[in-house]
Amino acid sequence: MPSSRSARRSSRGSETPTGARRTVTSRPRNQDVRVRPARRADVPALLDLWAKLLAFHRDIGETDMRLGPVVIADGREFFDEHIGRRNRLCLVAEESGTLIGFLVGTLRQRSPAFGGWRYGHVYDLYVQDPSRGRGAGAALVLEAFRWFRKHRVRRVQLQVRARNTLGIDFWKRLGFSTLALTMERSI
């Protein structure tokens, strides 16, 4: 059984349907924002943003989000698995030398029963307030699209929590649509 966090994550969420591309500029409205591949030296700042992402989800009512040392250690492992790896991606957005956001993704392959095609998967995207709404998120996504295309991938999937209306609206503006619905019940 795989022990890495990446291998444990599900990928049956939304995907970019054929023909759903929309024109979105990759240049952030704030010209001081720069998108680049993450470096190992970025991990402490990424962990701070990671904690803010989890707090954001907790604040919108996600009851299964936890913070604490174990979660931060898991985040460190997660970022370490994606920085500088051939089939994995970790991008950062920085403004005036300070990290304000990140995107983490990977390459995957569907089972033969579902077409067997390769696809890109976005695990997480986060831009901290007050930097939201100025194009940094879209710039991160478009840079990820370039990376996926370089790896001969033409579809991208992701999952968005139902309570995250800010995220759902963001992904819809970038041309994503619902493919599947994940449902849950406590028993």
Image (cartoon, grey):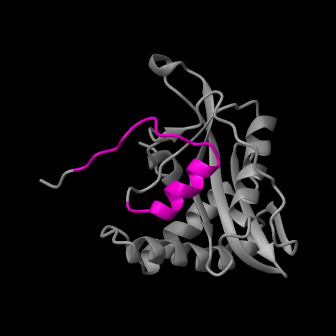
Dividing the image into 4 quarters, which one contains the N terminus? top left
Vertical relation: 152 (above or below) 43: above
Side of 50 relative to 68 (left or right): right
Work out which residue is located at the far right of the displayed protein and give it. Answer: 31
Residue 83 can be seen, yes or no: no
Q: Whole-percent x and y of residue 100?
A: 70, 75
Q: Whole-percent x and y of residue 51?
A: 52, 77
Side of 90 relative to 74 (left or right): right
- The residue at 66%/28% (across/down) is 19
Q: Whole-percent x and y of residue 73?
A: 51, 72
Give residue 146's quadrant in the image.
top right
Vertical relation: 57 (above or below) 175: below
Q: Which of 49/168 is in front?
A: 168
Asked if residue 170 is among those painted magenta in the image, a careful observer would answer yes
Q: Which of 137/21 is in front?
A: 21
Give residue 121's quadrant in the image.
top right
Q: Whole-percent x and y of residue 84?
A: 76, 55
Side of 114 relative to 154 (left or right): left
- The residue at 53%/78% (across/down) is 52
Q: Which of 172/36 is in front?
A: 172
Residue 28 can be seen, yes or no: yes
Asked if residue 91 is among those painted magenta in the image, a careful observer would answer no
Vertical relation: 75 (above or below) 27: below
Task: Give the mark count.
Answer: 0
Q: Which residues are drawn in magenta?
A: 163-184
- The residue at 39%/74% (across/down) is 58
